[in-house]
Image (cartoon, rainbow, N blue to C red):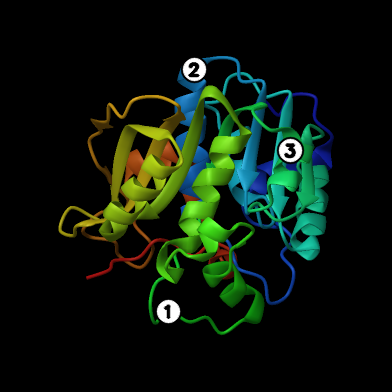
Amino acid sequence: MSDICLPASVAAARSAFPCGLEQPPGAYRFGADALLLGAWAAHCLGEAGRVAAVAELGCGCGAALFALLLHPALTRSPSLSLGMDDKEALCAAARKNAKMLGLPSCRFVRGDVGDPAFLRQCGQSAFAAVLANPPYDLPGRTAALPLREQALRSASCSDTETSRKEDGQLALNVFCRAASRLLTHHGRFYAIFPAGDISRLLSALSSARLGLRRLLPVHADRQHPALRLLVEARRDAASDCRLLPPLFLHALERGSGPGWTPEALHFCPWLAGAGQEGALSKVEAVSREP
């Protein structure tokens, strides 16, 4: 998106993005996952052309949605961008961030993405694209902050079938089913998920009638296996997946900084914010994992 003719304060906020976003104390701090998700959706939707409406499930302070809307690959902005979160404090922060970034088409609403009535109010079968960075529900994983812990582990159990699911699969199923309800026929679902949990991801997509179409493995560097998977699926479409060449985030010789590769910065310019002084408290760079 062009910064031409923007108010100086908005242009400055966009130039500093992702630094400067308001986040409530104790909330889940967005990291590189959110920025990569927004960039992935921007590249895919930029190829698709005009997209009328986009939604994000579990939007937090809005980082992924903003990364999508501000990405240069998205040549035409959606007429509506809707973020949904079950914490009003996060929705309030996202509204302030949208105003700061000059994004009047962004709306943020509090609600339970596992509640069909809430999804109908938001616009069932009304969105051409839906984004999600689902809670991982990894066994044994804990968080020091209470709101972060809730974000990692909680999801709605609005119906009996969902309540019978094992805890480790619950949040992912809820998010995938919510995306399916919101999407138009053949609408696009974008998600980021741990690469080691691909079997859980495939199961959740299939049960929600989301056919996997593209998969982009994300590696810390060329010596380590994939950490994350960036996914594009389509509602009521056959699974016909293209496995894309991997994205390597870091150079092998990083020096004192994160050492982002040129390919990573082209894919997601916002990663450069992780190298700025003080930015690491707001942008947790994807690190090497065994």
Q: Which residue is mark 3?
A: 120
Relative to 46, is 83 above or below?
A: below
Question: Which element is circle 1 on?
Answer: loop
- At label 2, the amino acid type is Ala
Residue 48: mark:
2
Query: In the image, which disc is placed on residue 141?
Result: 1
- Report the front residue among 199 and 247: 199
236 relative position to 282: left or right: left
Asked if residue 241 shows in the view, the reply is yes
| C-alpha separation, residue under disc 1 versus residue under disc 3 | 33 Å
Where in the figure is residue 128, as x and y percent of width and height? 59, 25
Q: Is residue 129 above or below residue 218?
A: above
- In the rendered view of the protein, which quadrant contains the N terminus? top right
**Which residue is the extreme one toward the bottom?**
144
Q: Position of residue 126 (x, y in %)?
A: 67, 26
Q: Where the C terminus falls, by quadrant? A: bottom left
Single out the residue that lies furthest toward the top: 49
Q: Position of residue 48 (x, y in %)?
A: 49, 17
Report whether residue 31 is seen: no
Which callout, 2 or 3, points to the residue nearer the camera? 3
